[in-house]
Amino acid sequence: MPAPDGSIASSTVNISGVHYRTIWPTATGSVRVIDQSRLPFEFATVDLETLEEAASAIRSMVVRGAPLIGATAAYGLALALRQDASDARLEEAARALQATRPTAHNLTWALARMRRALEPVPVSERAAAASREAARICDADAEQCRSIGRNGFELIRRCAESCGRPVSILTHCNAGWLACVDWGTALSPVYLAHDAGVEVHVWVDETRPRNQGAALTAFELAAHGVPHTVIADNLGGHLMQRGRVDMVIVGSDRTTAAGDVCNKVGTYLKALAARDNEVPFYAALPSSTIDWSLDRGADIPIEERPAAELTHVTGRTSSGAMQTVRVVPETSPALNLAFDVTPARLVTALITERGVCAASRAGLQSLYPDRPDSRPLASAAPSDSATP
Amino acid sequence: MPAPDGSIASSTVNISGVHYRTIWPTATGSVRVIDQSRLPFEFATVDLETLEEAASAIRSMVVRGAPLIGATAAYGLALALRQDASDARLEEAARALQATRPTAHNLTWALARMRRALEPVPVSERAAAASREAARICDADAEQCRSIGRNGFELIRRCAESCGRPVSILTHCNAGWLACVDWGTALSPVYLAHDAGVEVHVWVDETRPRNQGAALTAFELAAHGVPHTVIADNLGGHLMQRGRVDMVIVGSDRTTAAGDVCNKVGTYLKALAARDNEVPFYAALPSSTIDWSLDRGADIPIEERPAAELTHVTGRTSSGAMQTVRVVPETSPALNLAFDVTPARLVTALITERGVCAASRAGLQSLYPDRPDSRPLASAAPSDSATP
C-alpha cells in the first residue's frame, strides 16, 4: 500500500512491519478489507466480490467508522456495476447500500458523489469509472485525515507547552486509522503528536456494547506505540473531576450544519463531563461527515442494532479460543441504540481538514463557504423507534 | 426468613417461591450469604465460618452493596470473636474488616457500632452479644430500606399522576435487595410502586466493569416481575434527551455531610445528563451511609480494583458452561476505579429512612438533628492513586 509521504510522520499503524490501509482493490477486481469483527485478537482480511458482500460487511460491522463506511459503499457500488452498469442497477445498488446503516453521513455522501460522477459516463465505461472514483474517494479520505491530524496536532502541541507534562487525551469509540482509510480522525492528531515527540497518553473508553475502544483503539495505539490505558465508559467523568484529562477528542458519524455532533452512544455523556470540568471537547471529522441539509441534531436517525450486541460478549478464553458468552439473563430485554447527539453548545471546536472552527453554523461556514452539497437518498434502515 | 409485614407489599424478591434475605445466621453459628459473584445464572449460597472468610467475601464481592458490606462486616466481627473475644482480638478483627474495601461508609459505621456495643460487655459474653448486635444491624437495615421505599414511593406515585403513563426510572449499578439485607435502597421505592399497582419501567444500566446492573438488578427485577430493559451505560443520556426517562434513582456508598454522593463509577455522568435534561436525580440511602465527618466529596477514597475486572468478562456459553473471556488485548493496560462522586448540586434530593431532603448540609440536618456519630478506623485498602 502507498505509504504517506508527509514530513511529520512516515506512516500510521504498522502490523508486523507492514503499513496497511483499511480497504484496497485487489488485482482481480475484488475489494479487500480488514475484518474488524475479529480484532484485536486476530488480524485477518476478507475479499468482497459483490454488492451483497459489501453491503453485508457494512451492516455486520466487518467494516465500520463513518469514513470507512463511505469508502466501502463507494467500492460496493463499483462491485455492483461489474456485471450490469445500467442506470437501473446503479439506482438499485445505491439504494441497497444506503439502507445498510442509517446514521453515518459519509455513506450518503459517498453514494451521491459516486452517482454524480457515474451518471454522465456511458454504461460501457461505468464499471471502470466506478473503481477509479472509489479509489479517488479513498485517497481523498486519507489525505483529509492527514490534514485533520495536522490541524489537531497544533491543539495538542499548545496544550503540551502550557501543561508541561504528557498530554492526557480521552477518546470514545474508535475514530482512528481503522475507522477511516488511513490515519483516522480523532487519532490522527495523536499519531502526529506522538511521532513529533510530543508526549501523549490516551484514555481509551471501552465503548460498550461493541467495545470498539477496547478492541480497536487499544489495538491501534499499541501497534503504533502510543501510551494508553483502557477504562470503562463510566470512568471518564471521574478522571476529568480529578484533573487527569487535558482534552477530549472524538470522531463523528454525522455533524449538522449547526455543529451538533452525532457519534457513538455515550459521547454526549463525556461532553457533559468535559463542560462541567472545563476540559476542551473536540470532534474531528472530514467534511464528508457534515450533513448540510440538517440543522437539528435531534433529526438525525439513531440506529437500533441487535440486542445481542449488548447481551452477549465475545472474547478470547485462556486457551486461546474465541468464545461468545451471555452476560444478561434471558429473562431481561435489552435495547441497543448505537449513537447519540452532542449539542454544539458542548463542543469546544470542530477539527476538520480545512482547519479548526467553532461548532456552529458560522464556524462551519467560515471554513466551507463553498459548502459541498450532497444528494441524499431515502433510508430504509431501522432507527430509534423502540418503546420501553 | 421473616417476611415484611407492611401493608403496601408483602415481600420483595422471591427465588423459586422462597423469600430470602441476603445474609442470615445458621443454626451452627456460621453466616450464610447469597454468592452474588455467581448471579444471574446460578443462585447459590455460601457459608462464612471465620473472620477471614467474611473479609474475603467482602473483598472479592461475593457480597457487595454498601448496606450489605456493613451487615457482613458486623457478622464477620461476630465470627472473629467465637474463639477469642479479647479486646485485642476485637481491635484486630475490626481493622482487618475495615481494610477490605475503602469507599462504602456502612463498613466503618457497622464496625464502630459493633465496638460501641461490645466493648462494655464482659469477654465471656461478647461472642453471643456480637451475634445479637449483628442481627439487630440487619433488622434495622431491612426496616430502614423499607422506610426508604415508602418515602421514595411517594415521589414515583406523584410522577405517575402527573405524567399519566408508566413511570420510566433509570438506575445505575445494583442498589436493590441484593445490595442490602432486604428491599434495597434505590429499588425499594420501585418494588413498592409496582406492588401498589403504579406502572413503572426501569432502565437498567449494565454497569461496567462488573456488570452489577445486567447481572443483579436485571435478575432482581425479573424475579419480582417489574418491567425493565437493560441498556449500555452509554445510553442513558440519549434516553433522557429523548424524554424517555422520568427520574433517576441510584444508591450511595458514601454520602458526605454536605450531600455529595459517592456511588458506583458512572453515576456522576448520569447526574450530569439528568441536570442537562431537567430529569429529577435522586440518591436513596440509609443514614448509615452518611459520613458526617466529611464535607467534601473529593476527600472520599476511591477504590482501585483489579484491572482484570475490566479486561475480562465472565458469562454463560451457549452450552450452559460459565466461561471467562479476555476483551482487552494483552498489550494494553487498564485502570479500574470503582466509584465516583456526584456533587450535591446535581442531586435533586436524598431519599432516606426519615424522609426526603435536599442534598445539602441543611437538608440532612433537618432530618438528622441528632446526627448519629460514628467512630472511624484507619483504612489500609488501596485507593485512587494510579497514574497514567
Image (spheres, coloured by chain):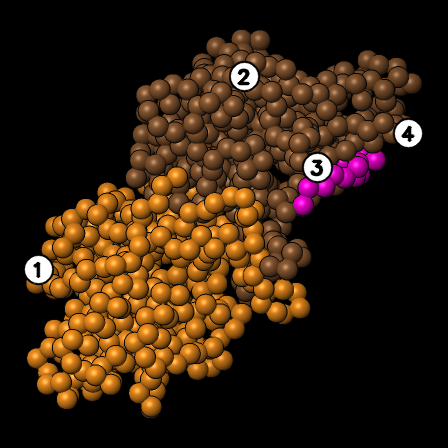
Chain colours: A orange, B brown
Q: Position of residue A339 (x, y in %)?
A: 34, 52
Structural distance between the alpha carbons of marks 1 and 4: 83 Å
Residue B8 is labelled as 2
Residue B245 in the image: above or below residue A123: above
Can residue B376 be seen from the camera position used here?
Answer: no
Q: Which residue is mark 3?
A: B34
The reply to whether the C-beta atoms of the residues labelled 3 and 1 are less than 8 Å apart is: no
Residue A375 in the image: above or below residue B146: below
Tell which subunit mark 2 falls on: B
Q: Label 1 is placed on what type of residue?
A: Pro
Q: Which residue is mark 1?
A: A369
- Is B46 magenta? The answer is yes
Residue drawn where x is 63% and y is 70% of the image: A320
Residue drawn where x is 69% and y is 19% of the image: B139
Structural distance between the alpha carbons of marks 3 and 1: 65 Å
Q: Label 4 is placed on what type of residue?
A: Gln
Structural distance between the alpha carbons of marks 2 and 4: 43 Å
Q: Which residue is mark 4?
A: B83
Q: Label 2 is placed on what type of residue?
A: Ile
Question: Mark 4 packing: few (<14 Cα in 10 Å), some, or many (20+)?
Answer: few
Residue B75 located left or right of residue A29: right
Which residue is farthest bottom?
A: A27
The reply to whether the C-beta atoms of the residues labelled 3 and 4 are less than 8 Å apart is: no
Q: Label 3 is placed on what type of residue?
A: Ile
Q: Position of residue B125 (x, y in %)?
A: 88, 17
Residue drawn where x is 91% and y is 29% of the image: B83
Q: How many numbered circles are shown?
A: 4
